[in-house]
Image (cartoon, rainbow, N blue to C red):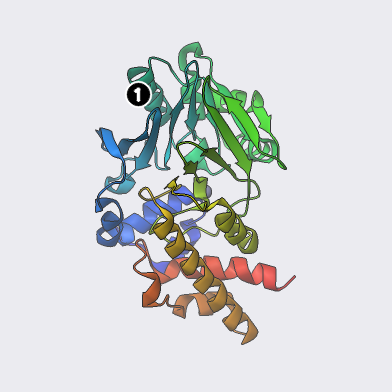
Amino acid sequence: MTLDRRTFLGKTVTCACHLALAASVMPTAARKVWAAESLGQVVAREAFGTLEKIADGVWAVISQPLNGDRTTLANGGLIAGKNAVLAVEGFNATAGAEWLAAKSMDLTGMRPTHVVLTHHHGDHANGISGFQMNGAQCAVHSTAVTRDIVVGRDAKTPGALAARTRALDGAVLLSNTEATSIDLGGRSVKVVPRGGHTQSDVTVELDDPSVVFCGDLVWNAMFPNYVDTTPSKFVGAVRGLKRAKDTLYVPGHGSLAKARQIDRYIAMLNEVEAGARKSFTAGIGAEDAGRTFMLSESVGPWALFSNVFYPRAFEAWYREFKV
Ligand SMILES: [Zn+2]
């Protein structure tokens, strides 16, 4: 598939498009992101990704959509307690949520009783009603901002799924200012309001074992999509979710990460900021500056990496510099 640059930029609106089109442009580099040895134990392998055990009662979905299967598209996971199971993310298609619900049944004897939506992007939200298929009870948790954006988007989309709107209309609203604890029976999950990737992002966190489901605040070894990003808040949120103790991070996209990968990510984000600031000060337009920007070798390779992504990042920074 060949795309001219204008078409490419015009279509890279959501995370889902960003990933799918980037994959078509740089398949070899992109495939390498997921080819590295996993930090988890693979318990299921599908055309669209893997399910990996990362601790007792904790599994990560690592989506690998590069062969065109967009069933899940975003990463997510499952956290099991004694009497409840929490799923992270609604995924790109209802089939993705239904698949994870069936895996939850296999692995824990329970379907997910809760699902947390980290932010509004379609690749994380569109399939959420799959957890409530055939009358299954599953409480949806999201912030009011996230709920309103998804429901508002559905209202404008011909043929939007009524089931998704119903699922979000019935959401249990998460605080925008303080962490919410969800008790699963012998295990408490913390949902922490953050932000920056979009107007409203949350992370889903465990203290023991130390695990952070980062949503799209973290992209491991892939250049993130800045389309809805407030960069200063974004970088601050990434720094804020990193823990001093040994922790496993489940990124929104890419493979599982430890502190080393998060540090490399932060170094890369800092370079983008420095580059944007320099060109803004020099009076160069975001589009032109982004097109010629290069990351230094010290931050290592970034797959799906193409100069067509930089203008988006620079535009986001310029919006802040101009205020
Ligand atoms: Zn996103």
**Which amino acid, by three-letter code, is at mark 1?**
Lys
Where is residue 93 shown, x and y percent of the image? Answer: 43, 33
Report if residue 266 is visible in the image: yes
Q: Residue at x 71, y 73 (%)?
A: 322
Where is residue 48 shown, x and y percent of the image? Answer: 31, 39
Q: Quadrant of residue 161?
A: top right
Q: Quadrant of residue 222?
A: bottom left
Where is residue 227 shown, x and y percent of the image? Answer: 56, 58
Q: In the shown orientation, is residue 83 left or right of residue 72?
A: right
Q: Residue furthest top?
A: 135
Q: Residue furthest front?
A: 245
Disc 1 under 8 Å from ligand 1? The reply is no
Q: Residue at x 63, y 59 (%)?
A: 230
**What is the secondary structure assignment of the residue under circle 1?**
helix
Report if residue 160 is visible in the image: no
Q: Residue furthest bottom?
A: 282
**Residue under numbered circle 1:** 103
Q: Residue furthest right?
A: 323
Q: Is residue 145 above or below residue 140?
A: below
Quadrant the C terminus occupies: bottom right
Q: Is residue 275 above or below residue 7?
A: below
Q: Residue at x 33, y 45 (%)?
A: 65
Q: Residue at x 54, y 24 (%)?
A: 114
Q: In the shown orientation, is residue 37 left or right of residue 263?
A: left
